[in-house]
Amino acid sequence: MAKTIEVPALARVEGEGGLYIAVKDGEAREIRVDIYEPPRFFEGFLQGRFLQDVPDITARICGICPVAYQMSSVRALENALDITVSDQVRLMRNLLYCAEFIESHVLHIFMLQAPDLTGHESVITLAQDAPEVVTDALRSKKIGNTLLRVIGGRSVHPVNACVGGWYRWPDAEELNAMLPDLEWGLEHAIESVRWAATLPYPDFEVDYEFVATHNDSEYGILDGGILSSKYGSIEEKDFEKYFPETHVSHSNAVHSHDQDGNPYFVGPLARYNLNFEQLGKTAQKIAKEIKAVPPLNNPYKSLIARTIEVVEVYDRAIRLIKEYKPKGPSALKLELKAGEGAAASEAPRGLLYHRYQVDKDGFIQKAQIMPPTAQNLARMEADLWQLSPMVLKMEHEEATLTCEHLLRAYDPCISCATHFLTLTMEELD
Amino acid sequence: MTASRKPTVAVYKFSSCDGCQLGLLNLEDELLDLVGLVEIAFFLEARRQVQPGPYDIGLVEGSVSTEEEVERIKKIREECGLLITIGTCATAGGVQALRNFGNLEQLTDIVYQHPEYIHALPHSTAVAEHVDVDLEIWGCPVNKYQVAEAIAALLQKRKPRLPEYSVCLECKLQGNTCILVANGTPCLGPITRAGCGAICPNMNRGCYGCFGPCPSAEIEAFAPVLKSLERYPGEAVHLLRTISGNAPAFRQAAEIILDKEA
């Protein structure tokens, strides 16, 4: 039976944190997901900044999903100013988001979670056993990063997005030149779904409350509104009424619960279950081929949802590039006024919500940011409670790996959550 | 480093966004070659297996912003032959050093419902303020090829080729019309270290100084120019205090401007 398990820090996640399981008489008595990533006070030092600085600063909350931070920021601020960007500006934002999903998902699928499912400690040893799997994954990840660079100037913390649109229209010729790579990426993504369907997932299902961005006209990533499996359709401005956050003592992150005090799930599994109908034909076809139609309630199978989402974003990226016809100014001229605006968009690891108050001169009065991993923390702890009877029967190493794998399957971004893993299991006296 | 074994590399994280470590994983074409040349002995974001130190090369991402980090960086200095900072957080305190210009108590009250749970130092600082550093690589994020160049140079026992000139040179080489001179756009290019490829002027916007000050920055001459180009009150100081605000030269430039206003 497992007891007193200690791992210095959870590996293959973005950022650092710990896990604590206290055991008494063979039962878990206390379970905590700890975050010891230092606080960075973003919401504090955004106060007093000019609104156009916000997307550059919030990008720095996360090096893995800076696009999500930029997109939630600019959309919330545009909502505060009551402005709507042009179709071509929105199209290019959608494309930038596709690029981030490719880069982040392929990194997580092959380099962070796949080692757990193939019996490897890392992608380095996976590469020794299956070099073609890793070289193809690296090629796909590079395509995502190249697309980010073409649109935004660089892949980490791109510099082209602004409130109102783009500093400069991305070059249509450069984007068109990427189409052969994107066609290869789409084929690789479809093969990845078939590969993901063959992997051995732990047998574990949870009746989740899912929350995700929802858009009637496409698989929701950039905008639309919010859909909850419990509350139904929610407007962006009402998000905090349904999902307030609380600060837990053992963590530098803020935990979220729904208004009834229950944990909820954001991320690929939430999007996939709530928005399956909106997936494009190519993604739906491969999902049906491997029989992965909703409901999908196994958190470890988030990897399958991620592979199907990669198909969706490659397919979408190809279509968007063909539809891209930039004309007129790349950004709206901003008419400043006092106001408040909220927006939710989907970071690869889940719903990211921003709300800002601005004064009449465009300076931030208040900023509120709810990162996906902070929202998932309560859900991760609840999963560990449900998993604990199974884990406590396991040998030490297997128990540790099963807990680690669960949390990795969430693709936690601890830097984002600010605001995360040492696994400590302690036998209480 | 002996010829009989591969040099060991450790990658450490302090207060940061993970973007510079991601730069290593983003070396898609070079990653597998790199793994052939060095032993990745400690890199939590990439692998579960940890080899005990000491290590030949330590790469540090992130700034020092808690008591625990002050102690940890000292231990890391002892276990690494060469210590390299990767990115503007580790080299100058990073975006979270914006707290250095405010009041930590107020900031904590703004962000957290229970400020008493939070333990952080009032200042976010560079690694070099706490221990000796052998090489500093700037950038928010770092240019991943500069990190690869630094590791390659160390393996070849030569000095790494890292640019010390300003962003202006990179910008001119690309044939851009100067947005500061021609359009009056506030731009930190003249005082900022090259390395990004002048991506902001390429996008028709001003540089916001991610790569920190270049060694030859003419701070006293440039500060009043920047001030004269403001599009809203306080823009010049805000621009200096974005990503590299705690770097001494940028701090000095902001103080010159603030002193003149006082």
Image (cartoon, coloured by chain):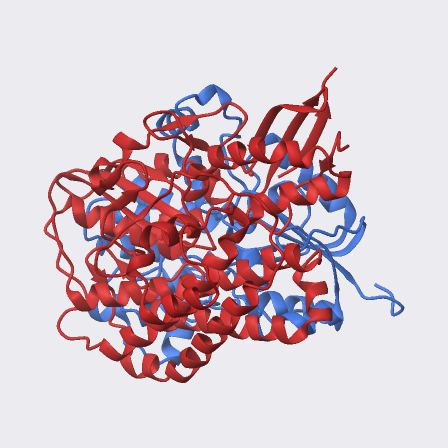
Residue A155, visible in the rendered structure? no
- Name the foreground residue: A336 vs A22: A22
| Placement of A414 over or under B68, stated as above or below | below
Q: Is residue A359 left or right of residue B250?
A: left
Quadrant holding the C terminus of chain B: top left
Name the colour assigned to chain A in the rendering. red
Residue A361, horizontal then vertical, whole percent: 15, 42
Residue B66, x across and y down, in percent? 57, 33
The image shows residue A171, relative to residue A359, as above or below, that is below
**Residue closer to the observer: A231 or A318:** A231
Chain B painted colour: blue
Foreground of the two, B155 or B136: B155
Horizontally, residue A422 falls left or right of residue A164, namely: right
Name the image quarter holding the N terminus of chain B. Answer: bottom right
Q: Eyeballing the image, is B98 above or below A275? A: above
Number of marks in the rendered image: 0
* Residue A278: x %, y % from top left: 28, 60
Side (left or right) of B234 relative to A429: left
Which quarter of the picture shows residue A47?
Answer: top left
The residue at 57%/56% (across/down) is B21
- To which quarter of the image does residue A67 belong? bottom left
